[in-house]
Image (cartoon, helix red, strand yellow):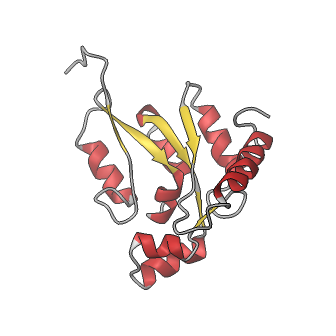
Amino acid sequence: MKNDYGLKMVLHPHGDSHIETREDIDRIFGATDPDYVGFCLDTGHIVYGQSDPIDIIKDYPERIDYVHIKAMDASLVKQAHDDDWPFGQAVAKGCSVAPPAGEPKMPGLIEALADLDKELYVITEQDMYPCDPSYPLPNAIRTREYLAECGLGLK
């Protein structure tokens, strides 16, 4: 079927949701047409789902339409799953971290995205609730500066 409207739905994986693991992502992609269903590559939620975002980029390059760059502390991800924490509890315990900490490693991720050779809308974010209100702005500035050193965005 041809997509005559140029419209596409973009799915977003999320911890503790119906699209969290690599198996969930593979199942959705196997049942949908890439002309109609794209993917928001949320690197942190993919790591939280215990998968590798770079593998998803390599396996589904035509699906990547939008990117949320974030990182997760792999040891806390494992503990969250082992101890069956809800996602919010994992975040409150510091699971979501600012790069260069955590997984995925940003230089390899940015290289894999560049290898797609297409324009992408990329944002960076960090789940950090609850947090001191004075923390997000300087954290965002440090993250932006680090990602620019890796070749993403403006220096």
Identify the residue at horizontal 57%, vertical 50% (top origin).
Answer: 125
Residue 33 placement, left or right of 11? left
Residue 89 placement, left or right of 96? left
Kindly give the residue lying farthest to the bottom in the view shown. Answer: 83
Looking at the rendered image, the quarter that the C terminus falls into is top right
Residue 99's spot in the image, x, y percent?
69, 56
| Occupied quadrant, residue 126 | bottom right
Looking at the rendered image, the quarter that the N terminus falls into is top left
Decide which of 93, 8 is in the foreground and name it: 93
Residue 115's spot in the image, x, y percent?
62, 33
Kindly give the residue lying farthest to the left in the view shown. Answer: 1
Task: Give the tally of numbered discs.
Answer: 0
Identify the residue at horizontal 53%, vertical 69% (top origin).
Answer: 130
Decide which of 84, 132 is in the foreground and name it: 132
Identify the residue at horizontal 60%, vertical 37% (top origin).
Answer: 113
The relative height of residue 12 versus residue 75 in the rendered view (above or below) is above
Residue 97's spot in the image, x, y percent?
63, 63
